[in-house]
Image (cartoon, helix red, strand yellow):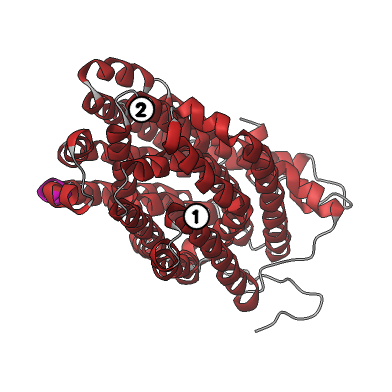
């Protein structure tokens, strides 16, 4: 139903402030993971298609390209975290007008940031690939692939932000369809462009571009056609939104960039053992998100639940949500690890892996996959930090994982070959996963006192009537809280 003229453009229902927190975690995670895993499955099939062309250099090229694209995805995730956190917080506080303005501002800021990144990245692609260790024909193939895909980065960012906004609204089903539609489109387009039009790796890149167009179309339909979430925005409200938005987005982007930095170091270490090893690392890079995509989705699903309950000041529900998310992580990761161990030989055969590539895939399935339990715990803790006004904690833990949890372990592991590199990468997750959870629950215990302090500040220092709602105390969003911590 359309909103009345002059009224808010967003309904004020806070879906996650009532009912079972475990149910919310499971529903949000399952719907988000369906679409997300669909994308990862298509990526894995895409690599399988490429491997059928019979050139190991092609698979290695995809591995190098994926390492660079991980940076763009991390930027998009970080900005999406800020969008979802602020909109969900506004909805939890029953401030529909601000939620609508933040929705529009988030999409505009995502577009500006990703366009700037794509423009800066494009001329430096060859240098980046050289830095990772790509050489000869593998370098040229990866470069051609990236030159097609990089201009679509803004489309990816807007599509991801639209999905995050739908989750913030409490509509995980339509958020699921944003990514699921992209996965279904890729499943059709990839074989057409790779084999039907005989474009090979460049066909995979072209299909990727078109899929991202579809993501945006489906996401806009859900956000505006169904929910009418977009609110009016002018320069004044945009600038007012910028401070709380960047208060989350900058630390969240910094947090997300830690993972591709760590992976880039691992890729360069693996590259020292040849294209065969890089191909194995690329295969792991496709298996991992398919196997653990549910945990990737869990971290994004927890955020809106936490934010809405924080906006409503329901602190015990926040604690219970995090406990439920960690229990879910434990059960899921142990189950998937067992399945990967059982099916390791099948996966090696499916991707046609030989030599070092086969050894790395087996090692991942039998041993390294178990470390993802601790990565999952880190994801849940980081989601809480980002949505409760402590994004710098998430940055600290993710960079700790990507540096102290990667470099020393991988450096020592190199002495034992490519397998030692991958084993070292997995082992580093344990310490930071445990520490992040401990700190997370200590932070949650401080929330009631923090809320009382903010309310006292608002009472003694009321904002002037002309001040924007984005910079006022109680409804100011996470950025204001962050400035005090």
Horizontal side, residue 195 vs residue 277: left or right:
right
Residue 365 picture location, percent across and down: 18, 42
Q: Nearer the viewer, residue 339 or 224?
A: 339
Q: Nearer the viewer, residue 419 or 13?
A: 419
Residue reaching furthest to the bottom: 1
Horizontal side, residue 337 vs residue 232: left or right:
left
Disc nearer the start of the sequence (2/1): 1
Residue at the location (27% across, 30% down)? 422
Residue reaching furthest to the right: 466
Residue at the location (64% across, 44% down)? 118
- Residues under labels 2 and 1: Cα distance? 23 Å
Bounds of the magenta span? 338-343
Q: Secondary structure at mark 2?
A: helix
Q: Quadrant of residue 64?
A: top left
Q: Quadrant of residue 87?
A: bottom right
Dominant SS of magenta comes to helix
Tell me if mark 1 has few (under 14), some (14-19) or many (20+) residues whose alpha carbon lies within 10 angstroms of its own.
many
User: From this viewpoint, is residue 291 visible?
Assistant: yes
Residue 417 picture location, percent across and down: 23, 22
The residue indicated by pointer 2 is 271
The residue indicated by pointer 1 is 205
Residue at the location (60% across, 47% down)? 79
């Amino acid at each position: 139903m359309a909103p009345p003229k002059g009224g808010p453009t967003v309904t004020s229902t806070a879906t996650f402030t009532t009912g079972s927190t475990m149910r919310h975690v499971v529903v949000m995670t399952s719907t988000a993971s369906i679409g997300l895993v669909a994308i990862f499955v298509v990526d894995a099939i895409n690599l399988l298609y490429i491997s059928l062309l019979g050139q190991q250099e092609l698979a290695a090229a995809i591995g190098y390209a994926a390492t660079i694209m991980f940076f763009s995805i991390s930027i998009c995730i970080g900005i999406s975290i800020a969008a979802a956190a602020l909109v969900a917080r506004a909805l939890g506080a029953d401030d529909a007008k601000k939620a609508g303005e933040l929705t529009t501002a988030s999409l505009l800021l995502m577009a500006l940031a990703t366009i700037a990144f794509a423009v800066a990245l494009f001329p430096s692609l060859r240098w980046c690939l050289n830095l990772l260790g790509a050489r000869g024909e593998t370098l040229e193939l990866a470069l051609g692939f990236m030159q097609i895909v990089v201009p679509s980065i803004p489309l990816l960012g807007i599509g991801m932000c639209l999905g995050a906004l739908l989750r913030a609204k409490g509509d995980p089903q339509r958020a699921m369809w944003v990514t699921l539609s992209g996965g279904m489109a890729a499943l059709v387009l990839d074989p057409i462009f790779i084999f039907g039009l005989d474009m090979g790796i460049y066909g995979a890149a072209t299909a990727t571009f078109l899929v991202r167009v579809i993501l945006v179309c489906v996401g806009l339909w859900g956000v505006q056609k169904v929910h009418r979430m977009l609110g009016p925005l002018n320069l004044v409200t945009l600038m007012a939104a910028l401070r709380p938005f960047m208060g989350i987005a900058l630390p969240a982007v910094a947090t997300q960039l830690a993972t591709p930095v760590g992976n880039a170091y691992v890729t360069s270490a693996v590259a020292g053992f040849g294209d065969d090893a890089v191909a194995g690392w690329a295969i792991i890079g496709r298996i991992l998100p398919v196997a653990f995509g549910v945990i990737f989705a869990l971290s994004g699903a927890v955020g809106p639940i936490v934010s809405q309950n924080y906006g409503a000041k329901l602190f015990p529900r926040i604690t219970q949500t995090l406990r439920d998310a960690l229990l879910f992580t434990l059960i899921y990761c142990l189950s998937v690890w067992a399945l990967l161990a059982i099916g390791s030989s099948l996966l090696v055969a499916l991707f046609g892996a030989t030599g070092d590539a086969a050894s790395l895939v087996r090692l991942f399935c039998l041993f390294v996959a178990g470390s993802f339990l601790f990565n999952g715990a880190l994801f849940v803790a980081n989601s809480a930090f980002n949505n409760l006004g402590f994004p710098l904690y998430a940055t600290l833990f993710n960079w700790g994982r990507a540096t102290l949890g990667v470099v020393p372990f991988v450096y020592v592991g190199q002495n034992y070959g490519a397998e030692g590199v991958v084993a070292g990468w997995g082992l580093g997750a344990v310490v930071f996963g445990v520490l992040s959870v401990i700190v997370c629950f200590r932070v949650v215990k401080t929330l009631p006192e923090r809320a009382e302090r903010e309310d006292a500040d608002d009472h003694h220092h009321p904002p002037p009537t002309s001040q924007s709602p984005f910079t006022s105390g109680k409804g100011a969003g996470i950025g204001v809280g962050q400035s005090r911590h």
